[in-house]
Image: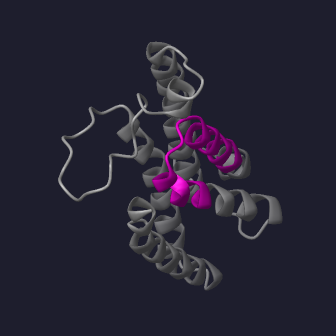
Amino acid sequence: MKAMAGTVPYAVALAAAGGAIWWLLSQNLAAGTWLFAGLLVAHGLIHFLFAVPTPPATAGAPEWPFSMARAWPVTAAGLDPRGVRTAGLARIVGVVAGLTLAGLSTVGIVVPSSWWAALVAAGAVGSAVTLVFLFNPQLIVGLGIDAVLLWVVVAGAWRP
């Protein structure tokens, strides 16, 4: 429970940042587009934390949530940790690539803006599947980001 409570400040900060980005986009300001692109890229890149070694535990701190060795397919289903790691790394590379391309598409650099909706949807779905596959309750904020991104695409709430 302590670990979940530790996500509240991140969720509040993310909600505030999302509100600011939404307002900037509604005002048709370029800063909103660039910040949204940055959010997409950052959301993708944070998945790389699953690939780094788990840092040493700190007394009183929550456990590292980005651990493939403690993922439910390993602990509950008894799958081979090497297989889970291979599948997880493949998913992570796909998510990072997809959301990075979505960010570039948001600002119209290298990737056509017409690809934006498909890239955001694919990146958000890939991220959600990865976070469920490697689930830790502390990662619920990431699933919330994916849900909002999918809503933006499906509802047509914004397009570059």
In this view, 28 is above or below 125: below
The residue stretch that appears in magenta? 120-145
The N terminus sits in image quarter: bottom left
Q: Which quadrant of the view contains residue 94? A: top right
Snapshot colouring: one colour
Give the percent coordinates (x, y) of residue 97: 52, 36
- Relative to the observer, which residue lies in front, 98 or 86? 86
Principal secondary structure, stretch drawn in magenta: helix
Is 91 situated left or right of 152 in this image?
Answer: left
The C terminus sits in image quarter: bottom right
Residue at the location (40% across, 46% down)? 65
In this view, 31 is above or below 154: below
Give the percent coordinates (x, y) of residue 7: 43, 65
Query: Is residue 110 visible in the rendered structure shown here?
Result: no
In this view, 9 is above or below 135: below
Count of numbered circles on the image? 0
Residue at the location (27% across, 36% down)? 54
Q: Say whether residue 129 is magenta.
A: yes
Name of the residue lying farthest toward the right:
155
Is 12 situated left or right of 25 in this image?
Answer: left
Q: Say whether residue 100 is magenta.
A: no
